[in-house]
Image: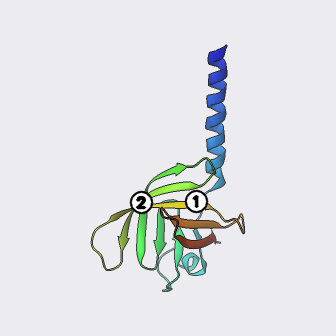
Amino acid sequence: MRRGGLLFAAVLVLVASQVSAAGIDLAKPYGNKSGCINKNGQEVYAEDMLLLTNTDFITATSACTFTGKRVQADGSLVVKAECEAEGEEGKSPATFIIKHSTKNAKKLVIADADGTVYGEVSRCR
């Protein structure tokens, strides 16, 4: 009987983690205005460009490719990435935290591991 209870609890935890993961769906790109304009390639240059896809995070000066994602208990995503910065050679590891904005649940906030916020992004149309 005890084994059945543990199995049920494990299934509940698995289902809860899948629901949380569904809370941040990156199947369609997110960006600020200039990021969404550039979602299909570089069309305009803007210092503030932010574009977030299921596989990448791109700014005006860097391009990061995701190497792993982990859903946190609060529903946020911790993303590991390899980044290339403008003017530098090679790639550097980075960690980003992606979560829903407290001001607007339809927007996402992107921050680095130290808590420095890059900005808020909305789903691109």
- What element does badge 2 sit on? strand
At label 1, the amino acid type is Leu
Q: Position of residue 22 (x, y in %)?
A: 64, 50
Of badges 1 and 2, nearer the viewer stands: 2
At label 2, the amino acid type is Ala
* The quadrant where residue 84 appears: bottom left
Q: Which mark is residue 26?
A: 1
**Left-right relation of 103 to 110:** right
Q: From where the camera sits, is residue 120 visible?
A: yes
Image quadrant containing the N terminus: top right
Q: Looking at the image, is 78 positioned above or below residue 124?
A: above
> How many circles with numbers are drawn on the protein?
2
Q: Looking at the image, is 12 positioned above or below residue 110?
A: above
Q: Residue at x 62, y 56 (%)?
A: 24
**Left-right relation of 2 to 115:** right
Q: Which mark is residue 15?
A: none
Q: Position of residue 99 (x, y in %)?
A: 61, 60
Q: CA distance from mark 1 to mark 2?
A: 15 Å
- Furthest residue to the top? 1
